[in-house]
Image (cartoon, rainbow, N blue to C red):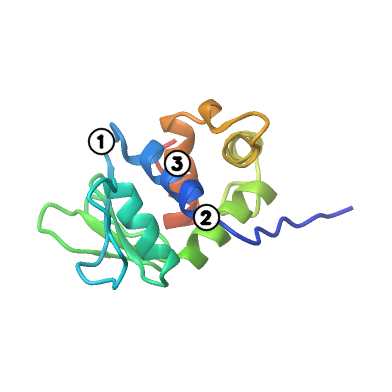
Amino acid sequence: METKTIITELNQEDLVDLLCTATYGSSWLDCSAPERTGCVIDDNDSREDVWAKALLAGHKIKCFDYYAEGEVYGPHGKVIKKDGTAVYFIGLDDILKGLQSCADGTFKHDDDEYGEREVRWLKECYAHFSDPDQGRMEMDNPEAEALMQVIMFNELIYG
């Protein structure tokens, strides 16, 4: 039997949890929102709140891969700096699709034991993100970064 995960909605809190956990302390990942989104930004909004509001308003955010060394993976990226930094333009649909492929194991991976371990681990990462009973406190930076890699690259590049 084959099953397919369909994520019907992500709210601001979901997006903030994912983006905050993935970028806080990350050596390779950072994000930014467009300067003009038409979103109401409160004085106490975090940068992740601004990103989430932009996504929910239909805008794409920029996700920077500082380890790219001139390489781009997947259809959303391009190299933007002489140091090889790549930027990925990510929208809410891209996040939904990436999370669904983590849950289902349909992201790009090898068909060997290593690929099977990646599938199991990313399913666990998704479960920590999505299961309110386990609580998002279970999701740590490496797990959130892994989810973001699938969202950005459709594969796990940095382990």
Distance from disc 1 to disc 2, alpha carbons, whole Å, reads 26 Å
Give the label on residue 107, or none.
none
Quarter of the image where one finds residue 3: bottom right
At a point 51% along the width and 47% down the height, the residue shown is 14
For label 2, the crowd category at 10 Å Cα-Cα, with few meaning under 14, some 14 to 19 and many 20 or more, is few
Mark 3–mark 1 contact, CB under 8 Å?
no
Give, as a three-letter code, the residue at label 3: Asp
For label 3, the crowd category at 10 Å Cα-Cα, with few meaning under 14, some 14 to 19 and many 20 or more, is some
Q: Position of residue 114 (x, y in %)?
A: 59, 35
Judged from the image, the secondary structure of the residue bearing numbered disc 1 is: loop
What residue is pinned by disc 3? 17
Q: Which one is in front in this view, the residue at disc 3 or the one at disc 1?
A: 3
What residue is pinned by disc 1? 27
At a point 28% along the width and 71% down the height, the residue shown is 37
- Residue most extreme to the left: 82
Q: Position of residue 138 (x, y in %)?
A: 55, 26
Give, as a three-letter code, the residue at label 1: Ser
At a point 27% along the width and 61% down the height, the residue shown is 33
Give, as a three-letter code, the residue at label 2: Asn
Give the label on residue 11, or none.
2
